């Protein structure tokens, strides 16, 4: 059975600017991490994995239409990196999907 690794490739964070009351504050990147394994590369199965950590709707996803290699979504988080609609940080997640395949191991005689 073929499965798919769902990986956060990069995370871009923008801080809320209290003065201008918008998302024009400091910006930084947090890097990526492994989200989980999907049973297929369909949007519904990928979204199921994403929603083990986040609350994201299909309409919240942006798919890279040029090469269909990545998708993105944004959430608002608090200072503990927990999703919170009243949080202080706007976080853009870039997601990659990678096929997992099983391969046979080629065993050869080892002569010492």
Image (cartoon, rainbow, N blue to C red):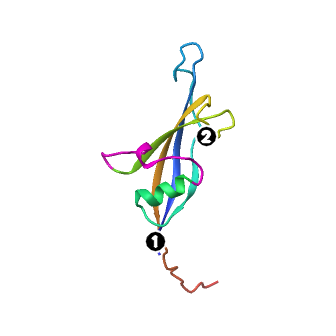
The local secondary structure at tag 2 comes to loop
**Label number found at residue 92:** none
Q: Nearer the viewer, mark 2 or mark 1?
A: 2
Q: Where is residue 25 in the image (x, y as percent from the top left)?
A: 56, 21
Binning the other alpha carbons within 10 Å of mark 1 as few (below 14), some (14 to 19) or many (20 upward) gives few
What residue would you read off at disc 2?
83
Q: Mark 1 points at which residue?
A: 2
CA–CA distance in space, label 2 to label 1: 31 Å
Residue 21: quarter of image: top right
**Secondary element at image label 1:** loop
Instruction: Tell me the magenta residue range.
Output: 52-67
Viewer-nearest residue: 12 or 46: 46
Residue at left 46%, top 52%? 96
The mark that comes first in sequence, 2 or 1, is: 1
Residue at image location 54% in from the left, 39% down from the top: 11
- Residue 61 included in the magenta stretch of the image: yes
The answer to whether 28 is drawn above or below residue 1 in the figure is above
What residue sits 47% from the left and 47% below the top?
A: 57
Residue at position x 50%, y 46% in the image? 56
Residue farthest top in this picture: 19
Q: Where is residue 81 in the image (x, y as percent from the top left)?
A: 65, 38
60 to the left or right of 23: left
């Amino acid at each position: 059975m073929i499965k798919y690794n769902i990986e956060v490739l990069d995370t871009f964070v923008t801080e809320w600017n209290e003065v201008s009351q918008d998302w024009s504050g400091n910006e930084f990147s947090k890097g990526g991490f492994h989200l989980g394994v999907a049973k297929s590369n369909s949007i519904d199965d990928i979204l199921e994995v994403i929603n083990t950590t986040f609350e994201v709707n299909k309409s919240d996803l942006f798919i890279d239409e040029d090469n269909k290699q990545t998708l993105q979504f944004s959430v608002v988080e608090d200072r503990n990196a927990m999703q919170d609609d009243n949080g202080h940080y706007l976080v853009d997640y870039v997601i990659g999907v990678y096929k997992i395949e099983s391969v046979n191991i080629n065993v050869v005689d080892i002569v010492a």
